[in-house]
Amino acid sequence: MNVRIGIVNLASVLALASLAVGMIASILCFLGRMDFDAFKLVFNLMSLLWFLTAPLWITPQLFGEAFTEAGKKAWLRPKG
């Protein structure tokens, strides 16, 4: 398997996981089951992870021709 395809696949999984964890942390904080300081830490880390991984998943063409081709073969990328 091409390394770049693996990078795009990993970035897509990490981006979606960071969104899920951020939403769960928000709900737990709203329900009073998570301390606000813990929520801020988790949400900031998940935001950082999202902003680092989402460009590789959503717009791999920004990183060159090799990543454009890898994006076409990745799991969670639209085909077309």
Image: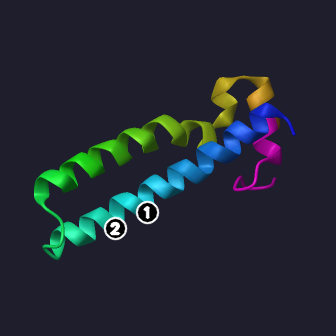
**Residue at image x 69%, y 47%?**
9
Q: CA separation, marks 1 and 2?
A: 6 Å
Q: Which mark is residue 11?
A: none
| Above-or-below relation of 4 to 22 | above
Residue topped by disc 2? 24
Between 65 and 25, the one lying in front of the other is 25
Q: Nearer the viewer, residue 47 or 36?
A: 36
Name the chief secondary structure element in magenta.
loop
User: Which image quadrant for residue 55?
Assistant: top right
**Residue 75 picture location, percent across and down:** 75, 54
Tell me what residue is drawn at x 77 percent, y 39 percent: 5
What colour scheme does the image use?
rainbow
Circle 1 crowding by C-alpha within 10 Å: few under 14, some 14–19, many from 20: few
Q: Secondary structure at mark 2?
A: helix
Under circle 1, the secondary element is helix
Is residue 16 found left or right of 77 in the rendered image? left
Residue identifier under label 1 = 20
Q: Is residue 18 above or below residue 66?
A: below
Q: What's under tag 1, amino acid-wise?
A: Ala
Q: Is residue 16 above or below residue 31?
A: above
Q: Which residues are magenta?
A: 70-80
Residue lying farthest right? 1
The amino acid type, in three-letter code, at marker 2 is Ile
Q: Mark 1–mark 2 contact, CB under 8 Å?
A: yes
Please rate how many residues cluster around mark 2, counting C-alpha atoms within 10 Å: few if below 14, some from 14 to 19, many from 20.
some
